[in-house]
Amino acid sequence: MTDQQTPVIAVDGPSGAGKGTVCARLAAALGWQLLDSGALYRITGLAAGRKGIALDDESAVSRIAAALDVRFEPTSEGVRVILEGDDVTTTIRTEEVGSLASQVAALPAVRDALLQRQRDFRAPPGVIADGRDMGTVVFTDAPVKVFLTASAEERGRRRYKQLTEKGISASLPALIEDIRARDERDSNRAVAPLKPAQDAVLIDSTSMSIEEVCDQVMNLVRTAGLI
């Protein structure tokens, strides 16, 4: 089976729409590869930092990006991230690694290397790709493309619930405002703006449960004849 024959389910959409949970559940149910593309810049920043590579050394960082030894494992909690055999799920979510990620994301050669590295996840029996430009840039020929969204208010509520459950104080109005500002930036950026692919199915999860969203995507997968 060639790369092009290996099916892809591309799930794009803004932060907080439920992409991570939905993609992890689909990958577990189908036994397919899982790609959390949004984590790759963080993982690259962490890998470069661990190897003592200066983040302004574009060619060295892009070599790290091209050869990332990383896998994403679906769990009941979401996604476990394994870098070179080490569970870095929690580590990559720290502020420190977030800062490294923003530095490496600014390097064009790293973006190019990660584009190819993302495509390398396309392996039998199939891949569930979670991101922002999976259907528009990375896997333009994906037989199933979904754009998963929810209102800014609902995404703010979900984030607020996550934070308060962890004992982190947060302001719901500030979170909603932050989400709106991020949507604006992501939709208007020059490179790979956040937008549905022309052939994507739009799913609004505002008033849906995770189970309902998963069922809807599974129906698309069945209709496409992928299972």
Image (spheres, helix red, strand yellow):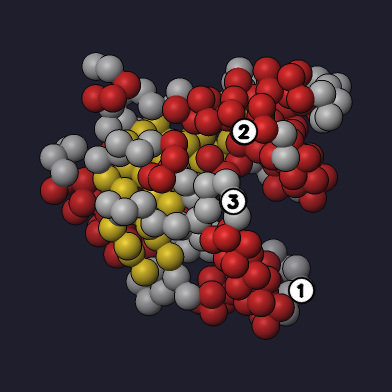
Which residue is identified by label 3? 190
Residue 90 x %, y %: 69, 44
Disc 1: which residue: 169
Above or below: residue 140 compared with residue 203:
above
Q: Secondary structure at mark 2?
A: helix
Query: Between marks 2 and 3, how big is the CA–CA gap?
Result: 14 Å
Frontmost of labels 3 and 1 is 3
Q: Secondary structure at mark 1?
A: loop
Point out residue 34 in the picture as x, y percentages from the top left corner. Answer: 43, 36
The amino acid pointed to by label 1 is Ser
Looking at the rendered structure, which numbered label has been put on residue 111?
A: 2
In this picture, is 26 found above or below 152?
Answer: above
Q: Residue furthest front?
A: 190
State whether residue 66 appears in this view. Answer: yes
Q: Residue at x 70, y 47 (%)?
A: 93
* Quarter of the figure with residue 149: bottom left
CB within 8 Å, label 1 to label 2: no
| Whole-percent x, y for residue 83 in the image | 63, 27
- Work out whether residue 24 can be spotted: no
Q: Residue at x 51, y 25 (%)?
A: 116
For the residue marked with disc 2, what is the amino acid? Arg
Q: Earlier in the sequence, mark 1 or mark 2?
A: 2
Looking at marks 3 and 1 on the same chain, the residue that comes earlier in the sequence is marked by 1
Is mark 2 in CB contact (under 8 Å) with mark 3?
Answer: no
Q: Is residue 31 left or right of residue 43?
A: left
Distance from the alpha carbon under mark 3 to that under mark 1? 34 Å
Decide: few, some or many residues near mark 1? Use Cα within 10 Å; few <14, some 14-19, many ≥20: few
**What is the number of the mark on residue 113?**
none
Total numbered labels: 3
Residue 130 vs residue 47: left or right? left
